[in-house]
Every structure is written in C-alpha cells, then in structure tokens.
Image (tube, grey):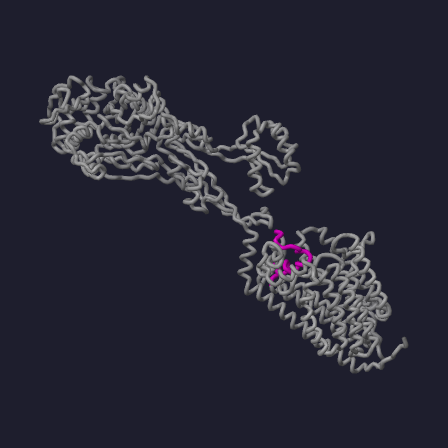
Amino acid sequence: MPKIYTIKDSILENRLFINRIVIAFIIIMLLSAGLVARLVYLQIVGHEHYATLAKDNSIKIKPLVPIRGMIFDRNGKVLAENTPSYNLEIIPEQVEDLDNCLARLKKLLDISDEKIDLFRKQRKREKSFASIPLIISMNDEEIAKFAVARPYFPGVDIQVQLVRHYPYADLASHVVGYVGRINENELKSLPEAEYQGSSHIGKIGIEGSYETELHGKTGYAEVETNAQARAINTVRTNEPTPGANLYLSLDIELQKTAYDALDIYNGAVVALDIKTGGVLVFASRPGFDPNPFVVGISNKAYQALQASENQPLYNRALRGLYPPGSTIKPFIGLAGLEYGATTFQHRLFCPGYYQLPNVAHRYRDWKKWGHGTVNLNDAITESCDVYFYSLALTLGIDNLKSFLQQFGFGEKSGIDLVGEKSGLLPSREWKKAQRNQGWYPGETIITGIGQGYFQVTPLQLARATATLANRGEIVTPFLVNKIAKSSAMEPGPEVHQGAIPLKSENIEDIMTAMINVVHSERGTAKAVGRGINYHIGGKTGTAQVFNIKQDAKYNENQIEFKLRDHALFIAFAPAEDPKIAVAVIAENGGHGGSVAAPIAAKVIKQFLGNYKHED
Amino acid sequence: MKTETRREQFEPPSIIGTLLRWLHIDIPLFIALLLASFISFVILYSAGGQQMDVLLRQAVRISLAFSLMILLAHINPRQFKRYSALLFGIGIALLLAVLIMGQIGKGAQRWLDIGFFRFQPSEMIKITTPMMMAWYLAEHSLPPKWRHILIAGTLILIPTLLIAKQPDLGTALLVASSGAAVLFFAGLSWRFLFSIAALLAGLAPIIWHLMFDYQKARVLTFLNPEADPMGRGYHIIQSKIAIGSGGIYGKGWLGSTQSELDFLPESSTDFIFAVFAEEFGLLGCLGLLVLYLLIIGRCLYIAAQAQDTYSRLLAGSLAFTFFVYVFVNIGMVMGVLPVVGVPLPLISYGGTSIVTLLAGFGILMSIHTHKKFLPS
C-alpha cells in the first residue's frame, strides 16, 4: 500500500485540541459537581438517617443483670443468698471436632445422653461463638476431674454463675418464697427493659412481694458488634444497680423452734412483735425445699409436692382458713363488756347445753355436765361455751360483726406478702349476698364460740391477739423491717391504723381472764404456765373439722386422725407488758391446751429468754 | 513558558534542580501523587483492619509503581510513539492468551501467572490502547475522517470485547473510554458523538442480552438496591450507610464502624471511598476530590502544552481516563452508578491498577519533560 502523506494543518489542529481540552475540563467539572451534589445529599441531607442505620448496624444493647438482693432475718442470718454454681460450657467455634470432644467429655464425666441432646438443641439456636452449657451445677468431683483434663479440651471451660440458694430450705419456704424461671405469662406483664437478661423472678413469699427491690435495676452495655453479631468491644456501660438487701423482722431461730414444735402436726405458728407489728415467726408446716425451684424442679417432683395430702406448698399461716373456735371468746367477751351486754361479774348457770326458747335443739357445751355457775372470767378461763352462746345472742350478729371487724377479722391484715386470704367474718349482709338467705339466731349462737361460717387465718388470729394485748392499738404485721439500698437503709412499711376505742378496765378484765387460762388452777392451758417468772395470757381453742376431703383414700387410723379437731392457741406475753403475740394452729391436734399451747409457750419462752439477754 | 524555561538554564544549576531535570519528574504532579499515596496508606491502615502487612504490601506496590513511573518518565515520548502499535499488539495477544487459558481453566481468568508475578494483561491494555489510538490518529490529519474513525473504533472494540469476555466490565469500560477519549481529543465531530450515543442507547437491550447473569444482577441491584438488602443490594446499602453516617466532619481516623465491623464489604479495595467518607466526612471527600481534580488539571495542562499530536492525544486521554476512574468508582460507591469492579485510583488496595496508573503518569511526565525548546 502506497504511503499517503497528508498535509497537517497544525494551527487548526492545535486550536481544535485546545478547544477539546477545555470542553473535557468543563465536562469533568460538571460531573465532579454531580459527585459533590451526591456527597452533600448523603452526608448532610441523609446524615441523620444513615447515622442511625450505622448505629443500628453496629451497636447492640447487652443487658447487665443486677445481683439480686439477699434476705436476712432480724439477727442477720442469711435466708436467701446467691451462691456460685459451676457450669461446664462449650464454645463450639473453638472446638475442632465437636463430636469427638463431646464423646471424650461423656467418657470423662459420665454425662447423660439427655444432657448432650439438650446441648445440641441449644447449640443450633445460638451463635457459634456463644458459650453453651453442657452440665449445669457441677459437683466437686466433676470439677476436679475436668480441671485435670482441661488442657485437652480447648473451647470447653467451667463458667461460674450465681444461683439463688435458701440455706434454711423448708423452714422458711413460705415466708421467703423462691425464685424461678420467668414463664411466658410473666414475660408478657414484666417491664421488658428491666428484665432483659434476667432469667429468674421471685414467685412467692418475700421473693415475690419484694421482686422490684430485690431485683435491682438492670444496667446495660452498648456493645459494638460486627456483621456476624460478635461483640467487638464495649462502647459504654451503664452499670446495674444491685438489688436491695432485705432485713426481715423474722427470727429464724424462733421460727425453727415453732416449726419443730409443730412436730407431727400440720399447721401454722405466727408470732408478732406487739410493739412494732414485726412478724417474728411465720411458720407453716410442712414446708418444702425451695432450692429445686430455682434451677427448675422436675415435673415429677413437683407433681409429688402437689399431690401430697399434707399440702406442703400451701402457706397455712397466710392462706389457711380455720374456724377460730374458742380462741374467739376473749374478743366476744370484750364485745359484751363494751356493749354492756354483760359485766365481768355477771353470772350464768351452765348446764352443759344451751337452748333457744321454744326450740328443742340443744347447743352443747364441750363439757358434757356443764361448768355450773360461771362469770365472764370463769367462762374464758374454763372456756365455757354456754356463756358465750348466751352472750352472742344478747349481742346480736350485727354488733358481733362490727366489733370483731375492728380486730381485723374478715379482712386482710395488709402484711407484705402476696396471696393473703381475708377469711370470713359472717354477717347478715354477707349471708344475704352470698346465699340469699336470712340470718338465723342459731347462727349467732355458734358464732359466739367461733364456729359456723367463721373462718380466720393464723395470721389474723395472731394480729387480733396482738391488738388485744396492745390494748386496742391496732397492730399491722409486716415482714420486711429494713430495705438496704446501696446508699441508705429504708425502713419497711410502717402503718399506723389507729386504735380501737376500748374501755381500759374492760380490756384489763379480759387480759386477766386470759392470764387465768394459763396460770389459774382451772385454766385450760395451765400446764404451760408452770415454771416461768412472768405471766402469759392465752386462750385455747378447738375447731371442729368439717372440711375433710372425702375423695382421698385413708386407712382406718388416718381417718381417725384426720377427723380429730384442730387445736388452737393464742397467747401474749409477758402479760404485764405484752411484747409478743402468738397464734398456733395444729391441724387435728385435738386439744388446744395440750397440743397448741405448749408450742406457743416454747416460742414465747425462747423469745423472752433472748429478750432478757438483750436487756 | 518557553522563555522561562530558557531563563532557568542560565541560572547557576542547583543540585536539586539538576537532579530533577535528570529524573524528568514533573514536580506538581509528583507531589500530588505522593500525597495521594500517603492518603492511601492512612485510609488503608484503617480499612484493612490496622494490619501492618497490608500497608507493607501496598508500600512495595507503590514503590514499584513509582519506580516504573520514573523509568517511563525517562523515556522520550518518541519511543512510546514508535512502539505503540507493537505494544498494543502484544497486549491483544496476551489478552487472547488469558482468554484461552480461561477456557482451559474454569471461570473468570484475568491473570497470567509468570512465576513470581501475576500479570494482568488488561491493565497493560489500559495504556497501550490510548497509545495505539493516539499513534494511529496522529498519523492522519485531524479531525479524523470517517474511515479512520471506523478503524479506530474497531481498534477500541477488540480489547474492550476481549476484556468484557473475561469478564471484567470495569476494565472494559475504562479501556473503551480511554480509546474514545483519544477520538474525542482528536476532534471527533459532535454529530458523530451524538449518533454514537444514540446507537449505544439503541443497542442497550442487545448488550443486556449479552451480559452475564452476575453483571445483569449488578445493574438491577444498582437500579433498586433496597429490593435485595441482604443479597446483592447489600454492598450499595452498606456503603451508602458508611458515607452518610460520616456526615460533614466524619467519624475520625480509625472511626469507621462500617468497615471495622465488617458491614462494608471490599472496604480495602473497591469500596475504600466509603471508609474514607465515613472517617473524614464531606470535608475530607471534598479535599480528596480537589486533589484528584488538581492531578487531572495538571495532566490536561501537560496535554495542552504537549508539542506533537501523538503526545497531546495520549496525554489528554490518560488525563480523562483517570477522571473516568475516579468518577466511576465514587459514583458506584455512592450508589449513582452500577457496581463495576473499578478501584479508587491511587487509594484502593491492590493489584496492578496502581502500577498502570503511575505508568500513565510516567508517560505524562515524559511528555512534559522531553519538550524540544524552540529557538525564540
């Protein structure tokens, strides 16, 4: 191909080229301006939006669970504490051959297949870098065995976790209660932010009632995480506020005495510090060991507890409903004096029964041949039924009801425990509303000896006794004496409900009669009054059992036992300056004087014995 | 200018001046490039997870690239012109070789493994294509005739298609634009430019049909990233979050959460601009953009000052292609252009791209420092 030489016009070319350079520069500047516009749009206009997205991307909130407050008795004895539990945990991503590792661990520590399956299930739900428990709460032998072999198990380690522990187990189970895993229903009603990361919640007892104080305030850490949600570092932490320690008015040693004294009987003992209303004893027998509930009680064990005829899960002191029986008599007597329906000296002949005019039905006295001629003092000391049949009828149900109500019968005491029963103080209105029936005089008569519809809790009985011994100054029971927040001690609930307007001579008379129950020769509880250098005021009671479960299978002996009356006793001491009020109910104990009164006496003696030392 | 240069020669020669003249370095360009390299180290340290070995490898590459630049600056532009066609031919041959080896091997193949060094022929072709174009068009009078345009177009198309087949859309785009830039600077008529644009628009469906699935996916993702936030849209969404969260002042050096925590993929390579924007904010971005524009401006100045047509066209093309680099990368990272694999020039970690870029600047320096001084 012949080469063609073209003549180049260099001036034209030069101008053209410079022209193009300028155009290129303009294009470049325009496009750059476009980039700048986009930058401005993203970094100024959209900044807030994208900054939020970036934060959401990288910052995860990790809850910091506060340490639960401890519970102490009045002498600083630990009732609920947090003890370390040692778990064997595996971080799957750090284990080269997980199957092999599990097989070796199984051989070393004799781990059940069930646990390994549970581990595998949990592993599927968790991130590969999460620590997943294989054995919860290792025993010393397991810890020792693993400690030796640990170098051969990279990615496997023992992790410490705090677990709630109740050293007194069944002794205070109904007062202290227990914590358990948060269930689905609770999850719905709980404040979500506060319970993120918390696995347990107080279910019953103090643990349940003071959940907010004990739980503390959940803190949080803002943790920077990467795209795989692995925590990289902690940006900011808001430390949790540990739960407050609670100091109860309860005396666990006294509680133990009461609990042990109940011995073979199911029942309850409640003792109150009359001066303050502090609960000294709040025993319900049988108790149960709350510790298994913390780690998750097995279904079988729970069923066994529920099915037990002794009903160990039942808080008798708080929720047990019993007829007050003769323990109501001092209150009826006081009502009689206050309303002028009788005088302390007024005498009445007791033939062993009581009859309404023109009615054949005889209301029997517990003493078949009668007490003879008795005044109010004798009637209380010897527990004459006939006197109170008569007095109750004279007073009438309306007066009875309004008088007894002042002592807290038929309503909740307001103790700082949830689930309290209000009992039943029968009245004309109640019967009308509940049964749509009129009130019969016969019902007034039996109310006079604490039978019929009348139902009280041991706590109510103790409270009424304390109020009586406090000469009408209403005692409001409470368990938590002090709430120790991190900074200061806060006093527990203190409620003054005023005083019942009572004539002091009337109350002195009744208290004298109650001292005679324990200390006079004819007293129904005279056995417990011997050998002490102070006076105890008391009243025995026997409540008829009309509420036997007919569906249960009992053998002959047990039927007899179960049909025996409940033994009751109320007491205060020292009578001259009452400090402690006690109510005892021994189910199927038979006689208040022989069974319930000694239990109360043990509590009183121990308490006042200690009391003297303190002075 | 010329008189100034002359005057310099009569001044007593300083050691530095002599050295620079001997090195054939353009000082403003050199300083700008050093600054860019410094920025690269700074941001790579952060984006690469603060690993020194990443910086070390980048340092080796940059030293290599600077050496090559100085070496090329030494060579008289006439030599480039002379070997343009040969180098282009070698480039095409290597591309074919890569393609054939790719057929034998599996999947995408971009490298030739020559023992100690993996060589990417497509990088070399980025320079040899404008060289070839400049050489071809400079042989004829400008503005180019239709016939020359047709041949030039074919010359662009050959390497472009070969690279697109690898498949490497980003490089193909850069190669095509480097060739087209030569045509543009050669004075291609506006009528022709617009007809090409119209033709491309008409061809779009056919190109779409010819594209690989992953390329189609990228385009679709670009059009609507939120449609697939966890999949293909992830890159763009995360990079927009990074840029946007930087705000005006940025989160500060090493303050990028998006890259530090692995939310931003390719944070050291193609998406490094997002890390830069997150850490240094709008002000930093504007600064970087200004630096780029200074480099481009200097290059265009060199082109305008060049003495022969070949040098002008080549210099203009290299300058413009550098901008295309910047524009495509930043555009894609900001979500205004589809994600094609184009690194942020001089800053991104990796590969042969920095070597090629500095080789281009070497040629520009050569053009600027080998001017014949015409007698006044």
What residue is shown at x 30% (from left), y 19% (from top)?
Answer: A560
Single out the residue that lies furthest toward the left: A358
Residue A391 belongs to magenta span: no
Residue A573 appears in the figure: no
Q: Which residues are magenta?
A: B261-281
Q: Would you place residue A139 above or below residue A531 in this image?
A: below
- Whole-percent x and y of residue A150? 63, 31
Give left or right: position of A525 versus B89.
Answer: left
- Whole-percent x and y of residue B39? 69, 60
Residue A86 sits in which quadrant?
Answer: top right
Front residue of A73 and A26: A26
Front residue of A550 and B334: A550
Residue B212 sits in which quadrant?
Answer: bottom right
What residue is shown at x 17% (from left), y 18% (from top)?
Answer: A368
- Whole-percent x and y of residue A88? 57, 33
Residue A434 sits in which quadrant?
Answer: top left
Single out the residue that lies furthest toward the right: A2
Q: Quadrant of the C terminus of chain A?
A: top left
Give left or right: position of B231 versus A577.
Answer: right
Residue A115 appears in the figure: yes
Q: Quadrant of the N terminus of chain A?
A: bottom right
